[in-house]
Image: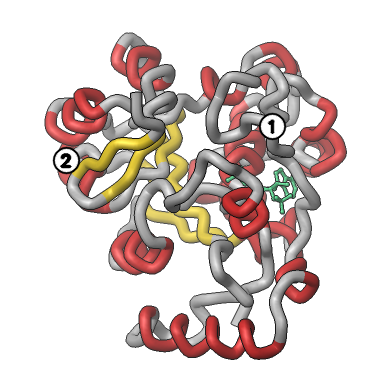
Amino acid sequence: MSAYFWFEGISFHAMVHKREIIEESRDKFVIRDEDTVILSYPKSGTNWLIETVCLIQTKGNPKWIQSVPVWQRSPWIETKKGFPILINKEGPRLMSSHLPFHLFPKSFFRSKAKVALLMGIFILCHALHISNWSFQTSSRSSPRVPCGSWFEHTRNWLSMRENDNFLLISYEDMKKNTRVTIEKICDFLGKKLEPDELDLVLKYSSFQAMKEIKMSNFSLNPEDVLTNGLVHMRKGTTGDWKNHFTVAQAEAFDKVFQEKMAGFPPGLFPWK
Ligand code: A3P
């Protein structure tokens, strides 16, 4: 079996995804008003945001994050593992997705479900976080970028950023202003946390804490092609691109970035 398959211009890992699920989730999966979706391009800090949202839901109590793997707490809609969990789950659901706009469940666009879009910039980027670059280049079985181009993915999803049910967060802001960002997420989700509960969210969602939790660091999931042989939580810092890009590469990237992301207001991208 080939390691990849193509679906409407996007390549997917066959080990993690299945054509029928991508199709069914787009056409038939019903996203409900009370659902919360964490949306991101791969390697944007998705698992950090999931951990944070889970801890907000439990008001800082770590029991849930310490006993249930991240992909069961917030299943990925488009995956073989996640889809069956979601369709069988009653009540408000927390779910994740890396899907591009055009493959996302159509029902979402008629719903009031809350979406937190996490934006970070990785592949080929001078933009301050080298995560995906390292991830892709160190994976021998990974000749292509899954989930399509970062530019397309981000451009299309950003078109919804003014909607009331949409919250835009960046990895860089999460790093720089973690507490403020958590408060923003609480407001968005309508959760009121006391200062000591916020302290607990911060404590248990820290890089060090997550690295040590088996339920969060993907060490329980060695067969997953996305993590196979690779360190899921590498450095967890911004600005690491400086150690990997030459000045010429950074300039070339900057030029492409300006072209591809033209039209967005200055200040939208915190790494610029
Ligand atoms: P690095 O490879 O730079 O370490 P995703 O969850 O979307 O796959 O993103 C993975 C990136 O998020 C990794 O970046 C990982 O270290 C970082 N990350 C995960 N948890 C984090 C945390 N609590 N604080 C900061 N970065 C975190």
Q: How far across and how far down the image is residue 81, in percent? A: 42, 17
Q: Residue at x 23, y 44 (%)?
A: 103
Using residue 81 as the reference point, say whether residue 135 is left or right of it. right
Mark 1 residue type: Gly
Badge 1 marks a residue whose secondary structure is loop
Q: Nearer the viewer, mark 2 or mark 1?
A: 1
Residue 87 visible (yes or no):
yes
* Mark 2 close to ligand 1, CB under 8 Å: no
Tally the marks: 2
Question: Which sits in the foreground, 40 or 147?
Answer: 147
Badge 2 marks a residue whose secondary structure is helix
Quadrant of the image containing the C terminus:
bottom right
Mark 2 residue type: Lys
Q: Residue at x 28, y 48 (%)?
A: 10
Residue bearing the label numbered 1:
229
Q: How far across and how far down the image is residue 175, in percent? A: 74, 59
Question: Which sits in the foreground, 79 or 210?
Answer: 79
Using residue 63 as the reference point, say whether residue 26 is left or right of it. left
Quarter of the figure with residue 226: top right
For label 1, count other residues whose C-alpha is less than 10 Å away and answer few (under 14), some (14-19) or many (20+).
few
Using residue 72 as the reference point, say whether residue 9 is left or right of it. left
**Residue 106 image label:** 2
Which colour assignment does the render follow?
A: secondary structure
2 or 1: tag closer to the N-terminus: 2
Quadrant of the image containing the N terminus:
top left
For label 2, count other residues whose C-alpha is less than 10 Å away and answer few (under 14), some (14-19) or many (20+).
some
Residue 92 visible (yes or no):
no
